Amino acid sequence: MSSITAAGGPPAAGAPQGGRRGQSFDPSSLARHSPRYGERAVMVVLQGAAMLSVLVTIGIVVSLLLPALSFFREVSVGEFLFGTRWTPRFPGQESYGVVPLITGTAWTTAIALLIAVPFGLGAAIYLAEYAAPRVRKVLKPVLEVLAGVPSVVYGFFALTFVAPFVLEDLLGIEVGTFSVLSAGLVLGIMIIPTVASLSEDAMSAVPSSLRQGSLALGANKMRTTLRVVFPAAVSGIAASIVLALSRAVGETMIVALAAGTQARVVTGATQPGQTMTGFIAQTATGESTPGTLSYNTLFAVGLLLFVLTFVINMISIRLVRRFREAY
Amino acid sequence: MTTAPSGSTTPTDWTDMTSTDAPTTERPAAAAPQDASAREIDVRVDRASGRYLPEVPTPVIECTDVDIFYGQFRAVHGVSLVYGKNEITAMIGPSGCGKSTVLRSLNRMNDLITGARVTGKITYHGQDIYGSDVDPIEVRRRIGMVFQKPNPFPKSIYDNIAYGPRVTGMKVSSMDDLVEESLRGAALWDEVKDKLKQSAYGLSGGQQQRLCIARTIAVRPEVILMDEPCSSLDPIATARIEDLMEDLRKDFTIIIVTHNMQQAARVADRTAFFTAKAAEGTGDRTGQLVEYDLTSKIFSNPADRRTEDYISGRFG
């Protein structure tokens, strides 16, 4: 067998089993019996899978960066970031201040988190700590189905149900057809499963020995949950919130349908407003000619979206490192 | 801790052991012998500790005809035991004999397992701890537990100790003092006094286990249950915990489950030997109490053949 290896021949798979134990098999030899091509091939495939996501990310950055750079050759960064008029498609009076879009995104995202964090964490605590195993087995998949509903359905829900019936008729809040409130509420409902499911995973992963230690000291269940399980799971919980936040910032269909298309600075929840994603969805309809300023505007906004999400992620990671109680 | 003068045979000496600052009111001496002549033969010198022990322990926890079920499966059958005040009681026996199950039923930690059920009676100072009006949280505040694997919280050493008093709403005049006192009580203070704010996870396994003991005594329970507290520790750390148990006996009642017979012989005042009996039809192994006596008796002159076989290493 060792002579085959030395000759670089085919792996021993085809050789009869008896051959291994025959005269050519030297039990005292530690030399490799086969070249193990399979293992190497698997490693290469896995490596490729890992590299792919890195390469795609780099590709996205480059494809965003190039048109965005030509945008910033015509519009200064200061004007873009701090200008409060966003009228890129008004012929003759184009203005490229992105602040209105940022306020739109900030309002919808903030409202979404106000909904998703309490309800999502509440659901997670219930599922991880209180629910009987049988209840959890049913409830968790149901909750996760919510995450699979297409966002355009949510947007339609916001437009035709939440705004006119829930907000206006039921709660008596004067909102028009479009408002950041209805978009944010539905956005929040959409990301509840993200928060709940991932937080539940994080809390369930906390060793039960820690819970038992706390209970054996005479702590009740709520204290055990809040002061032992929660701090121990905080990195996973924070990750779930950051992921939900990123989804809210990046979500397009709901805000495009329900928040409106007027790009103006939003100062109240009942106002309509356009988000960064809403603008991109509205503008990227094939009318824009590549290379024009209006086309490059899309990429500038896209880049800003990318940078914002990235920064939020970095800050969250820092915060989590500081506060988590790793077990 | 051998406070009793060795060699003394004064029959009342053993009562000194109960006159500690344990946080309970004095109980009626339920175990007091009926007459003076009985008293003289009732008191024995324990071989290991040189302590005087009454023939019948002063009961803190009493099991009467206890069966423990997990669903339909009967894990333990017919256990009747009295755990004596300020004594160390060991429960030994082969794997699967139900000794840990019995231990966990004493402070209702079994409640956490779905399907666990206790029949018979377990009383704490005469009060049925499975009574309908009993709050398991109150039971666990009085009957603390140290687990097999050290399970400190992922917090600082200080916060590990302060956690119990905080969450149980203990009135503490100075948390710093309580932390120091608890750590001293667990013979850990000198090793950690300069790093109280550091994570408990930086401690060695033996230190972590002593931290868990310190955490338990910080809420001042009357009884400490120990579920194989040394099974994941090296012999040196084990010896330190055993020394610590000797000290803790002054203030606490200790009930320990151990796989290590030598440990039981070294530390325990009384030893209960459990074994498992397979049911004829199903083959389910149900734990039962074989023998319960002074440790010196169990290890020198056991009444039951199975005990003798086990301690001499013929099975288990």
Image (spheres, coloured by chain):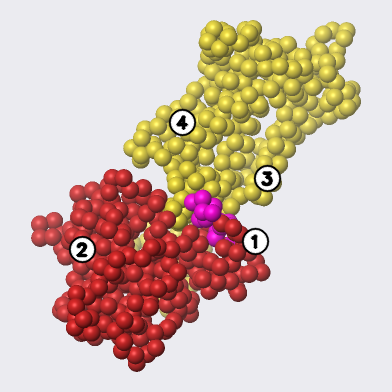
- Residue A267 colored in magenta in the image: no
Q: Earlier in the sequence, mark 3 or mark 4?
A: 4
Q: Earlier in the sequence, mark 2 or mark 1?
A: 2
- For the point 35% across and 40% down, the residue is A133
Q: Which mark is residue B224?
A: none
- For the point 48% across and 48% down, the residue is A224
Which one is closest to the eye, mark 4 or mark 2?
2
Chain A colour in the picture: yellow
Q: Amino acid at mark 1?
A: Lys
User: Real-space Cα distance between discs 3 and 4?
Assistant: 27 Å
Asked if residue B261 is positioned above or below residue A277 in the image, the reply reads: below
Q: Amino acid at mark 2?
A: Val
Horizontal placement of B164 versus B254: left or right?
right
Asked if residue B286 is positioned above or below residue A270 in the image, the reply reads: below
**Mark 4–mark 2 CB contact (< 8 Å):** no
Chain B colour in the picture: red
Task: Give the secondary structure at mark 1.
Answer: loop
Q: Quickly name the residue at label 1.
A: B197
